[in-house]
Amino acid sequence: MHDWDPALYQRFESERTRPAVELLARVSHPAPRHIVDLGCGNGNSTQLLLERFPQSQLIGLDNSEAMLASARKRLPGVPFVQADIADWAPTVAPDLIFANASLQWVAGHAGLFARLMRCLAPGGVLAVQMPDNLDQPSHQLMRELASQSAWRDLLAHAADQRAALLSVEAYYDLLAPMACRVDIWHTAYRHVMPSVQAIVEWLESTGLKPFLDPLSAVLRDAYLQAYTQRIGEAYTERADGHRLFAFPRLFIVAQRAP
Ligand SMILES: C[S@@+](CC[C@H](N)C(=O)[O-])C[C@H]1O[C@@H](n2cnc3c(N)ncnc32)[C@H](O)[C@@H]1O
């Protein structure tokens, strides 16, 4: 994939940060000494962590140069490191690993979640939020268009970039033996969007990236035009002209036994 675009990502920042706020609200650790924000992006989730735990040693980690540059500008006092979550190991056991909207980009969840739990200090907390939207029209339509002849060859592997989530029960069964507390919930947001274009713009900086990055400008424009039309049909206009963009998300907070 091409690098992320922090400016495009920031366009819907308050909607994107809301799940991070709701995830953090369920973290009950009184005073984590070491915190890692995995897949910190442009630092919006890191800023929440800094505000809640100003005394902690906090680091942000991401593999996107562009996102890290934006995060460093936002929070100059916080160390941000470039690394891949897939093979990251902490030098000091964290008391809180926070991963808002990042682990869906990393494959092998059974191994990954077990490894993150083992990385925690005793009593430490793993707090994760992931979009659970692969079956939503927004994502079904991406795949449906990618299977059409105009784009099929270039987009053969586009859908593989996102990790399919395990079932809720599988996450629970995996985490419960390693934890003294597991809190799992789903929220289906209905974002009130001003236009079809706004829904497409939202997705362009995240879920659509693997489908747009491999395309030439001409093919990209044609794909976006067809996609925008289908999104308009799937997310119909309400009486006031707005569109409700359904966005289910899965939240997990697991605390390692002290
Ligand atoms: C949707 S953004 C989430 C940013 C932020 N945590 C938030 O709450 O809005 C996902 C971030 O995960 C990062 N990411 C994806 N895969 C990664 C990996 N394997 N290792 C490190 N970071 C990764 C991306 O670069 C991107 O900045």
Image (cartoon, grey):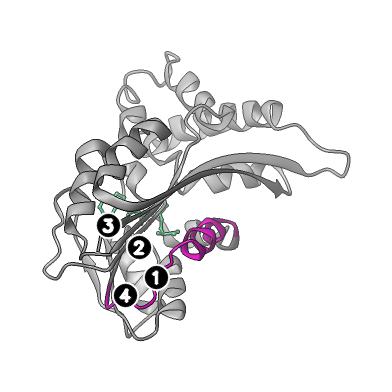
Specify the quarter for ligand 1: bottom left
Q: Nearer the viewer, residue 104 or 225?
A: 104
For the residue pair 140 and 226, the one nearer the viewer reads as: 140
Q: Nearer the viewer, mark 4 or mark 1?
A: 4
Q: Residue furthest right?
A: 239
- Say if disc 1 is inside 8 Å of ligand 1: yes
Disc 2: which residue: 40
- Identified by mark 2, the residue type is Cys
Q: Are marks 2 and 1 in contact (CB under 8 Å)?
A: yes
Secondary structure, mark 3, is: strand
Q: Is residue 131 visible?
A: yes
Residue at the spot of label 4: 32
The mark lying in front, picked from 4 and 2, is 4
Q: Is mark 4 within 8 Å of ligand 1?
A: no
Circle 1: element type: helix
Give the magenta part as a residue range: 15-34
* Discs 1, 3 touching: Cβ within 8 Å: no
Q: Nearer the viewer, residue 15 or 248?
A: 248
State the residue position of label 3: 256
Mark 2 and mark 1: Cα distance apart in space: 6 Å
The first of marks 3 and 4 along the sequence is: 4
Q: CA distance from mark 1 to mark 3?
A: 22 Å
Farthest residue in the left direction? 91
Pointer 1 residue: 46
Q: Is residue 108 visible?
A: no
Mark 4: amino acid: Pro
Mark 2 or 3, closer to the camera: 3
Residue labelled 2 has its Cβ within 8 Å of some atom of ligand 1:
yes
Farthest residue, direction top: 149
Q: Nearer the viewer, mark 1 or mark 3?
A: 3
| Identity of the residue drawn at 88% across and 39% down | 239
